[in-house]
Amino acid sequence: MTDMNAFNQQIIEEFRGNGGKVGGNFEGAPMLVLHSTGAKSGAERLNPMMYQKVGDNYAVFASKGGAPTNPDWFHNLVAHPQVEIEVGSKKINATAKVLAGEARNSIWESQKVAFPQFAEYETKTDRVIPVVLLEPADS
């Protein structure tokens, strides 16, 4: 887990140093940094992730690369839906809402078309990959 933390920290530093842009595997992808509250610890957690703009909102995907379990940050959002996100050089307070049904499916399908690796993640797991809508407080 330490390796993943170091990897995430490197992405966050690059993101902040380049106005929200990163290179490598994420070059050209829409990225944000999610600030959540740990479900068990209550500590602040930071996670860089790809997003899809949905109107004034931001959809994020609990894919975990197709792992059999949801990522920790997803559990944090369910327990504490009030979050902060960094998009570009802006910080935005938002509320996380787990989507279901057609609302989830339409966003998920367009994410798979735009970024085919998400379709691959889906084939690696039996779980339905959660889609979470981050709704800015000021929209």
Image (cartoon, rainbow, N blue to C red):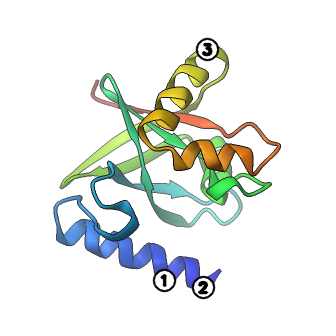
Say if 88 sits above or below 108 in the image: below
Asked whether the residues under the numbered discs 1 and 2 touch, taking CB atoms below 8 Å apart as contact, a structural biologist would say: yes
Question: Which of the pair 114/129 is nearer the observer?
Answer: 114
State the separation of the CA atoms marked 1 and 2: 6 Å
**Dot 2 amino acid type:** Thr
The residue identified by callout 2 is 2
State the separation of the CA atoms marked 2 and 3: 37 Å
What residue is shown at x 56% (from left), y 17% (from top)? Answer: 103
**Dot 1 amino acid type:** Ala
Task: Give the x, y percent position of residue 79.
Answer: 66, 45
Task: Give the x, y percent position of residue 16.
Answer: 23, 67
Circle nearer the viewer, 2 or 3: 3
Place residue 128 in its image quadrant: top right
Relative placement, left or right, of 125 versus 48 is right
Residue 120 appears in the figure: yes
Circle nearer the viewer, 1 or 3: 3
Q: Residue 102 bears which disc, if any?
A: 3
**Dot 3 amino acid type:** Glu
Asked whether the residues under the numbered discs 2 and 3 touch, taking CB atoms below 8 Å apart as contact, a structural biologist would say: no
Secondary structure of residue under mark 1: helix
Task: Give the x, y percent position of residue 129.
Answer: 68, 40
Task: Give the x, y percent position of residue 20.
Answer: 23, 58
Identify the mark nearer the N-term, 1 or 3.
Answer: 1
What residue is shown at x 60% (from left), y 85% (from top)? Answer: 2
The residue identified by callout 1 is 6
Q: Residue 112 bears which disc, if any?
A: none
Say if 72 sits above or below 78 in the image: below
State the separation of the CA atoms marked 1 and 3: 36 Å
Place residue 52 in its image quadrant: top left
Say if 57 sits above or below 31 in the image: above
Secondary structure of residue under mark 2: helix
